[in-house]
Image (cartoon, rainbow, N blue to C red):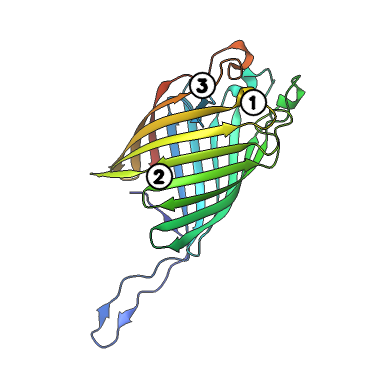
Amino acid sequence: MKLKLTLALSALAYAGATFGQAKAPEPDYTLSFNASVVTDYRYRGISQSRLKPAVQGGLDFAHKKGFYVGAWGSTIKWIEDSGATDGNVEIDLYGGFKGELAKDVAFDVGVLRYEYVRNKLGAVSGSANANTTELYGALTYGVVTAKYSQSLTNLFGTTNSKNSQYLDLSATFDLGSGMTFTPHVGRQLVNNNPNSNYTDYSITLAKDLGNGLSASAMLVDTNAKSSAYTWGGKKYVGKSGAVVGLKYSF
């Protein structure tokens, strides 16, 4: 179970007539942290770490009214593989609002900034600065979630790619005993760069190990063209593969 650090404490209510103690009310807001290691950092099916392990971590602030902000980071290799002299850390900054529209129907809208620390990709011929901003919106009905993202800037260093889109469809099935199974399919559309368009697929099995620790195993594949996703002539980073991860949340 994910442990959360409660920032606002509420007093316990007592039932006057029976002197019985009531359940503590929901805290106004919570702050949570996580740290993880993965055998490969895949994002939208594409390896960000040259098919190598990555170290990751993040924090999240959530208000009971539905507002949230957070930050998450990972080691990466793709920017330097593309010929830049620096840019081996990704920091994601995000904020949004989530809630329920009706019974079993939830929504989530927000903005996400991908910040690639000190990245020099813009100095590479034919590339733009890697930093990217996206708006996103998602609807969840039961176990199924559909999400749409659109870039407000060039997408991940691709020139003339503002207003690129990503479509994401996934489902999360509770298998019991702390295990979940999540199939996913996504479609990346890179504006004005049809050679970079692709579809990605994955299935993930995750297990809650208790005390904030969880493990996951994912099989992933894409139909991305090797000509578009073999950065710096090194490795084709859209190939099929397996990813194992271990995460601690507190």
Q: Position of residue 247 (x, y in %)?
A: 39, 37
Label 1 close to label 3 by CB (< 8 Å): no
Q: Position of residue 109 (x, y in %)?
A: 56, 53
- 29 w.r.t. 84: above or below: below
Looking at the picture, tell me which residue is in the foreground, 228 or 93. 228
Q: Position of residue 165 (x, y in %)?
A: 61, 38
| Neighbours of disc 3 within 10 Å: few (<14), some (14-19), many (20+) | many
Looking at the picture, tell me which residue is in the foreground, 123 or 162. 162
Residue that protrudes farthest toward the top in the picture: 233
Residue that protrudes farthest toward the bottom in the picture: 17
Mark 2 or mark 3, which is nearer the start of the sequence? 3
Residue type, label 1: Pro
Residue lying at 42% horizontally and 36% vertically, measured from the top left: 184
Residue lying at 47% horizontally and 62% vertically, measured from the top left: 101
Residue type, label 2: Ser
Horizontal placement of 41 versus 194: left or right? left
| Gap in angstroms between the C-alphas marked 1 and 2 | 39 Å
Residue 238, label in figure: 3
Horizontal placement of 165 versus 204: left or right? right
Q: Residue under label 2, please give it.
A: 249
Q: Position of residue 75 (x, y in %)?
A: 54, 29
Residue 194, label in figure: 1
Mark 2 or mark 1, which is nearer the start of the sequence? 1
Looking at the picture, tell me which residue is in the foreground, 157 or 248. 157
Mark 3 or mark 1, which is nearer the start of the sequence? 1
